[in-house]
Image: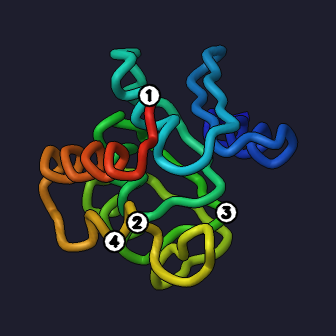
């Protein structure tokens, strides 16, 4: 079984929000949004060439997966901007549903992280914008 298949199976059967796999190394999270991805990025773990599975990938999460240097991702739901960004960076993408944008948790607008990075193309600028938005929303690691 490939690392991507393993991460996908764990995501769908374990109730996780996101899963990273490479060989026998597995990282999982129940945290929603970009928080677990930022935590993994800031942990300085070497996650290059891991495969990831995630319930929802908007452009904010896609930028973080690019920064983590994963080689493949699966998403139950992915936004078109996220799909385009991952493809641009050569990351293999599998998904169940593509949507124009990710909706916020209230269902009355766009995900704040996707909105924050929607017109950003630079990875470092996107990361700064995501961290600033987390601070603004009182989301702490």
- Counting residues from the N terminus, which is met first, the one under dot 4 or under dot 1? 1
As helix, strand or loop, the secondary structure at mark 3 comes to strand
Q: Which of marks 2 and 3 is in front?
A: 2
Instruction: Find the distance from the CA under tag 1 to the CA under tag 2.
Output: 18 Å
Which residue is pictured at 61% across the width and 47% down the height? 32
Q: Which mark is residue 68?
A: none
Q: Which mark is residue 39?
A: 1
Q: Which of marks 4 and 3 is in front?
A: 4
Q: Residue 76 carries which label?
A: 3
Which residue is pictured at 47% across the width and 84% down the height? 100
Q: Are marks 1 and 3 in contact (CB under 8 Å)?
A: no
- Counting residues from the N terminus, which is met first, the one under dot 2 or under dot 3? 3
Q: Do the residues labelled 1 and 2 touch (CB within 8 Å)?
A: no
x, y percentage for residue 123?
A: 18, 49
Please tell me how crowded label 4 is: few (under 14), some (14-19), or many (20+) other residues with Cα within 10 Å. Answer: some
Instruction: Find the distance from the CA under tag 2 to the CA under tag 3.
Output: 19 Å
Instruction: Find the distance from the CA under tag 4 to the CA under tag 1.
Output: 21 Å
């Amino acid at each position: 079984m490939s690392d991507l298949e393993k991460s996908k199976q764990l995501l769908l059967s374990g109730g996780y929000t996101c899963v990273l796999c490479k060989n026998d190394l597995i990282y999982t999270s129940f945290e929603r949004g970009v928080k677990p991805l930022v935590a993994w990025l800031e942990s300085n773990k070497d996650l290059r060439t891991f495969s990831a599975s995630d319930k929802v990938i908007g452009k904010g999460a896609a930028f973080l997966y690019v920064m983590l240097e994963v080689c493949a991702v699966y998403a139950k739901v992915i936004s078109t901007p996220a799909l385009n960004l991952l493809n641009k960076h050569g990351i293999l993408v599998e998904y169940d549903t593509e949507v124009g944008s990710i909706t916020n948790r209230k269902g009355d607008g766009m995900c704040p992280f996707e909105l924050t990075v929607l017109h950003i193309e630079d990875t470092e600028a996107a990361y700064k914008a995501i961290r600033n938005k987390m601070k603004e929303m009182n989301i702490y690691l």
